Image (spheres, grey):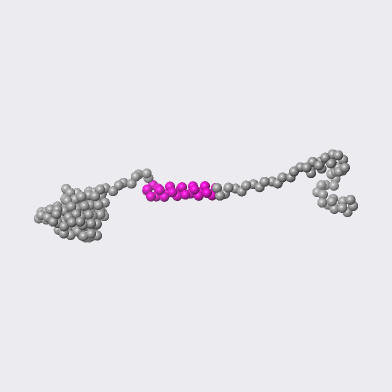
């Protein structure tokens, strides 16, 4: 080995020049070299990537569950009370034609004596039967539909009131019989004001 080569190796050797070295010729140096050469080299296994996809799927599933529960609460009003079924239709007798001869003077006070009072829209007129959907209850009921049954021969007018599908009416009744003589009729601002005044106290 030339002096120049030794000088280059000295510059590349990180070990301090003052550290003693053992020659390569002794048996111990050969055994150490053989041990180094026979030791297998292993590469460090790469760490598996974090299971981000699994975590993302789990988060999405939890979010979907939360939304489903929130939607259920919104639809049910936030309680466990089962929905109440609509009350069956209320049926009233439209009365006899000769009741028109027994009229009394109309007043909100007399109107307020009625046991049943509501505003409704006619949905069907079938001969002597008139069906109304209740728009407003003033007194005496909770049904969403009322059926007026009139005697045969009163198809055109029930108690003098022409019922037409799609029109709105104010109806009062006592003992299951519809009141006439101005106590029931087409919904006008004046009659509605009288109903509101008569039933202001429920």
Left or right of 54 in this view: 121? left
Question: Residue, x 57% and y 49% (percent of image)?
Answer: 52
| Quarter of the image where one finds residue 190 | bottom left
Q: Residue furthest right?
A: 2
Q: Position of residue 59 (x, y in %)?
A: 51, 48
Between 128 and 197, the residue placed more toward the observer is 128
Residue 90 showing in the rendered view: yes
Question: Residue, x 74% and y 45% (percent of image)?
Answer: 41
Q: Is residue 73 magenta?
A: yes
Question: Residue, x 55% and y 47% (percent of image)?
Answer: 54
Range covered by the magenta-colored residues: 55-78
Q: Position of residue 10 (x, y in %)?
A: 84, 50
Question: Residue, x 21% and y 52% (percent of image)?
Answer: 147
Establish if 15 lies above or below 120.
above
Residue 113 showing in the rendered view: no
- Dominant secondary-structure state across the stretch colored magenta: helix
Q: Position of residue 5 (x, y in %)?
A: 87, 53
Q: Position of residue 45 (x, y in %)?
A: 67, 46
Left or right of 20 in this view: 142? left
Q: Is residue 118 magenta?
A: no
């Amino acid at each position: 080995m030339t002096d120049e080569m030794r000088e280059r190796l000295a510059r590349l050797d990180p070990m301090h020049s003052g550290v003693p070295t053992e020659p390569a010729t002794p048996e111990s140096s050969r055994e150490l070299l053989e041990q180094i050469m026979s030791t297998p080299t292993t590469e460090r296994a790469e760490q598996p990537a974090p299971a981000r996809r699994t975590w993302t799927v789990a988060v999405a599933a939890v979010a979907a569950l939360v939304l489903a529960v929130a939607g259920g609460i919104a639809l049910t009003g936030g309680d466990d009370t089962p929905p109440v079924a609509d009350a069956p239709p209320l049926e009233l007798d439209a009365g006899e034609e000769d009741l028109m001869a027994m009229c009394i003077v109309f007043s909100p006070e007399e109107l307020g004596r009625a046991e049943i009072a509501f505003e409704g829209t006619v949905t069907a007129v079938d001969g002597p039967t008139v069906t109304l959907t209740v728009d407003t209850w003033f007194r005496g009921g909770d049904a969403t539909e009322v059926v007026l049954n009139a005697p045969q021969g009163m198809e055109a007018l029930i108690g003098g009131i022409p019922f037409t599908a799609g029109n709105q009416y104010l109806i009062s009744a006592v003992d299951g019989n519809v009141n006439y003589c101005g106590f029931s009729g087409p919904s006008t601002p004046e009659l509605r004001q009288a109903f509101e005044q008569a039933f202001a106290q429920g």
